[in-house]
Amino acid sequence: VGIDKQGALVDYANAKYATNDSRLKFENVDVVSDGAFVANHREVFHHIFSFYCFHFVRELELALRNIYTMLKPGGSFAFTCSMHNNFFSIMSHMAKMEKWTPHISQYENYLYPYESTPHPDEEIRSLLLKVGFQVMDLTMNPQRWKMPFADASGKKSCPPSNNNLADFSRICRFTSPI
């Protein structure tokens, strides 16, 4: 079972993957607020994975508690997320621009709860333990990400007609690298 709170992603996954394999199923679920799904899947899963989602979850403790509830005893949970990311700083600058305000004015609702803390790994570890997990490994690996439309030198790799790139590139130059 794969879940996501974005219906379009679930529809795509079902059309692309579930039609070819009856073992696969994707559902529109918010792991934070869909108590019925959690209750119906209590101690069902051996393993749960999450890739690059938790930095968008505001109620992280509840999400982790629900995940823990759905794991079988002895089950495992593995995840990756962004602990610190210049993208959020870029969004805060763009949100102040008249052109972008209507589109990203509520970006604060999507900021990772630990984005501004000096030791997010320690806070995540504490939260995982509080929920009931045994933490086998929790590491922060600094990584550089290359945006698909521009490289570090500022060379555009997208069509030059993309007027929005100029705003993004101008702000990127003012943020500090990792």
Image (cartoon, rainbow, N blue to C red):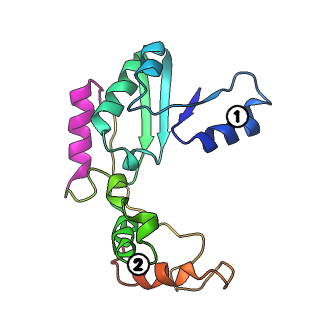
Task: Using the image as rendered, state which of residue 104 and residue 173 is in the foreground.
Answer: 104
Q: Is residue 75 above or below residue 9?
A: above
Q: Which residue is mark 1?
A: 14
Q: Is residue 136 above or below residue 86?
A: above
* Label 1 residue SS: helix
Circle 1: is it few (<14), some (14-19), or many (20+) Cα within 10 Å?
A: some
Q: Position of residue 33 (x, y in %)?
A: 39, 30
* Label 2 residue SS: loop
Q: Horizontal placement of 43 versus 4: left or right?
A: left
Q: Residue at x 67, y 84 (%)?
A: 161
Q: Is residue 13 above or below residue 18?
A: below
Q: Which image quadrant is residue 127 in?
A: top left
Q: Which residue is mark 2?
A: 98
Q: Nearer the viewer, mark 1 or mark 2?
A: 2
Amino acid beneath label 1: Asn
Q: Which numbered disc, 1 or 2, marks the residue that appears first in the sequence?
A: 1
Amino acid beneath label 2: Glu
Q: Horizontal placement of 92 versus 119: left or right?
A: right
Q: Position of residue 73 (x, y in %)?
A: 39, 13
Q: Position of residue 53 (x, y in %)?
A: 45, 46
Gap in angstroms between the C-alphas marked 1 and 2? 38 Å
Q: Residue at x 40, y 81 (%)?
A: 171
Q: Which image quadrant is residue 141 in?
A: bottom left
Q: From the image, which quarter does the C terminus lie in? A: bottom left
Segment tinted magenta in the rendering: 118-135
Q: Residue at x 33, y 47 (%)?
A: 139
